[in-house]
Image: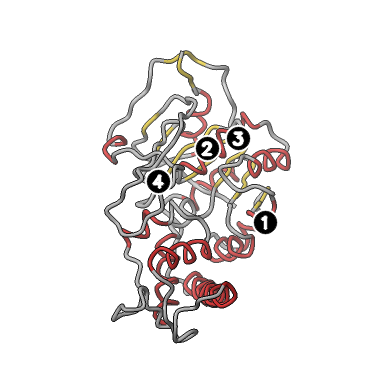
Amino acid sequence: MAVSCNHSAILFSPSTAGSSSVSSSSSLIGFPRFQTLRFKSRSVYSKSRVSPVSALPSRSLEALIFDCDGVILESENLHRQAYNDAFSYFDVRCPPSSSESLNWSLEFYDKFQNLVGGGKPKMRWYFKENGWPTSTIFESPPENDDDRAKLIDTLQDWKTERYKEIIKSGSVEPRPGVIRLMDEAKAAGKKLAVCSAATKSSVILCLENLIDIERFQGLDCFLAGDDVKEKKPDPSIYITAAEKLGVSVKDCLVIEDSVIGLQAATKAGMSCVITYTSSTSDQDFNDAIAVYPDLSNVKLKDLETLLQTIVTAA
């Protein structure tokens, strides 16, 4: 399958990331004190900037690799919608004294989804911090591990089916420029891959409905979280993709939307461009070779030029 890119980009020279952290305080209720991400003001990407550099040997773009969630589709708000629909369907009250069903706001979820990964861990953490809820599943808040696991499993299963319904509804479209860039890459004889940390069934569902079955089947490599032992920011998925594609990591270009994906790509030895979303725009993308708000104006030739002229701080 194929994708496309271009916009007023911000160019960066790759550098070794320092220790990354998120502020331990939050204006939103109940955030975990994680130290995983680095954030910057959104204004940092308002202008192009290139550090004083010395040129590296030229690289050749042989393979274009896309992440799925956040790159091919802006999925996080769809997940939020599915969670809230599940909370409403089962009348989840958290805390139990609440007069209405639980509803995660966009502002809350934009932060929360970058701090706690996975659906079940999200709910488990939230309920632990804010009180185990009442619901139509359990009239009283569950008190033992088995009942709590049943509550979370039931909510997650219903949420997953609801998310599938949303994807299949025809109302969801790929992010701007993705289809065009994929087609440009294929037409130019480039290898094309999708590497996502999500489960294989979820990624297949998204790809078949958003880029169509023909493009999906035309991918030279497709890897999901099920295919590797460690998930991003571990580089395994990108190293495995390069091996399957039969190309050097230095001749691969990755398109990601988050610092976690960026770390996975750079640890694999690959160059990476970022197309950020509303929930990742504050992250520190200094190790990316370019940053775009979306791919609507990004052409394959732009990415080839980027990779050929890649530079590093002297």
* Farthest residue, direction front: 143
Do residues under tags 1 and 3 come within 8 Å of each other at their CB atoms? no
**Disc 2 to disc 1, C-alpha distance:** 19 Å
- x and y percent of residue 164 in the render? 53, 72
What residue is disc 3 on? 252
Select label 3 or label 2 by which is in front. 2
Select label 1 or label 4 by which is in front. 1
Residue type for callout 1: Asp
What residue is disc 4 on? 276
- x and y percent of residue 17 in the render? 47, 29
Residue type for callout 3: Cys
Is 101 above or below relative to 74?
below
Camera-side residue of 174 and 302? 174
The disc label shown at residue 263, or none: 2
What residue is disc 1 on? 226
**Disc 1 to disc 4, C-alpha distance:** 25 Å
Select label 1 or label 3 by which is in front. 1
Select label 2 or label 4 by which is in front. 2
**Disc 1 to disc 3, C-alpha distance:** 22 Å
Camera-side residue of 191 and 263? 263
- x and y percent of residue 118 in the render? 53, 59
In the displayed structure, does residue 149 sit left or right of residue 41?
right
Q: Callout 2: few (<14), some (14-19), or many (20+) C-alpha neighbours within 10 Å?
A: many
Residue type for callout 4: Tyr
In the displayed structure, does residue 61 sit left or right of residue 94?
right
Q: Secondary structure at mark 1?
A: helix
